[in-house]
């Protein structure tokens, strides 16, 4: 950011170089030499048939798994040299198809969960959670528990929670997979609005042609390799 030449701004935010991932159980080759570059504020859809390696790639980029060979770089630094717990907590926000929100907590309480590992005070956590719930359009449902929320509303809670620690990158695995067409459109618009307002980099996996069409760039995968993009 301080480089007067602008090289840091122009360089990839996330980069995967010659990534392979082999799972010994069954000798599954999930990735076969995948290289990708993701720049700041990009909106990218990763598409391809089931079993092509999309989720594996997302997990490697997010530090949830390590490659068998190759390396992932964040701002030019190999993930192998970073504190992965801190990287996942501070730099990356995750949104999953199954939401992973707690039924025993209200919407706004769920948003606070990632903040418990930070130095924020209880008051600061509460204020940030309230702000995020408002940003995703759920201020009127802030005290509702997940069983009383629609599927689309639960996904909005999951998105707000993913933003709790102000990440640079939002990684979403089929974020609209369980939604009807109206909710899908609303969530896509929300993600795009958040990307614009917060300067987020957005990477999502999808089987939906509509979701892929809304992204700025599409990476197509097949048989553990990048076929296009």
Image (tube, grey):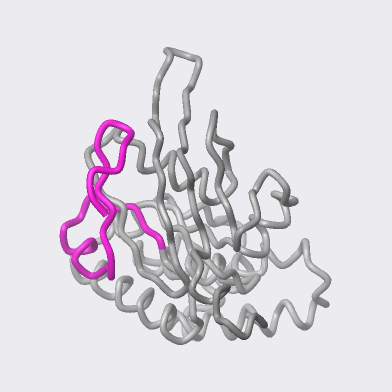
Residue at the (47%, 72%) spot, across then down: 40
Q: Where's residue 190, x and y in %?
A: 36, 78
Say which quadrant the C terminus sits in. Answer: bottom left
Q: 57 and 182: which one is in front? A: 57
Among the 4 quarters of the image, the one containing residue 132? bottom right
Query: Farthest residue toward the front?
Result: 5
Q: What stretch is highlighted in magenta?
A: 203-229
- Residue 70 against residue 3 in the figure, above or below: above
Q: 105 and 32: which one is in front? A: 32
- Lateral position of residue 207 relative to residue 194, left or right: left
Number of callouts: 0
Q: Where's residue 219, x and y in %?
A: 28, 53
- Residue 160 against residue 72 in the figure, above or below: below
- Residue 214 against residue 100 in the figure, above or below: below
Magenta highlight on residue 228: yes
Among the 4 quarters of the image, the one containing residue 179? bottom left
Q: Where's residue 114, x and y in %?
A: 67, 63
Residue at the (43%, 70%) spot, across then down: 156
Q: 58 and 19: which one is in front? A: 19
Magenta highlight on residue 132: no
Residue at the (51%, 85%) spot, across then down: 134
Query: Farthest residue toward the top?
Result: 26
Among the 4 quarters of the image, the one containing residue 136? bottom left
Q: Where's residue 88, x and y in %?
A: 64, 55
- Lateral position of residue 205 relative to residue 84, left or right: left
Say which quadrant the N terminus sits in. Answer: bottom right
Residue at the (24%, 37%) spot, across then down: 222
């Amino acid at each position: 950011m301080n480089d007067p030449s602008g090289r840091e701004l122009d360089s990839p935010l996330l980069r995967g170089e010659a990534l392979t991932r082999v799972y010994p159980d069954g000798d599954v080759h999930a990735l076969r030499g995948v290289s990708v570059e993701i720049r700041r504020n990009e909106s990218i859809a990763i598409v391809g048939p089931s079993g092509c390696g999309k989720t594996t790639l997302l997990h490697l980029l997010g530090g949830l798994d390590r490659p068998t060979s190759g390396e992932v770089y964040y701002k030019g630094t190999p993930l192998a040299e970073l504190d992965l717990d801190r990287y996942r907590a501070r730099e990356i926000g995750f949104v999953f198809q199954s939401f992973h929100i707690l039924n025993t907590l209200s919407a706004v309480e769920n948003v606070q969960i990632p903040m418990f590992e930070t130095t924020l005070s209880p008051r600061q956590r509460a204020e940030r959670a309230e702000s995020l719930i408002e940003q995703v359009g759920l201020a009127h449902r802030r005290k509702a528990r997940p069983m009383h929320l629609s599927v689309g509303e639960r996904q909005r809670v999951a998105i707000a929670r993913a933003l709790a620690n102000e990440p640079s990158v939002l990684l979403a695995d089929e974020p609209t997979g369980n939604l009807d067409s109206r909710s899908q459109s609303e969530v896509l618009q929300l993600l795009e609005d958040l990307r614009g307002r917060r300067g987020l980099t957005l990477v999502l996996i999808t089987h939906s042609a509509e979701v892929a069409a809304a992204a700025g760039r599409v990476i197509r995968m097949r048989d553990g390799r990048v076929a296009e993009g």
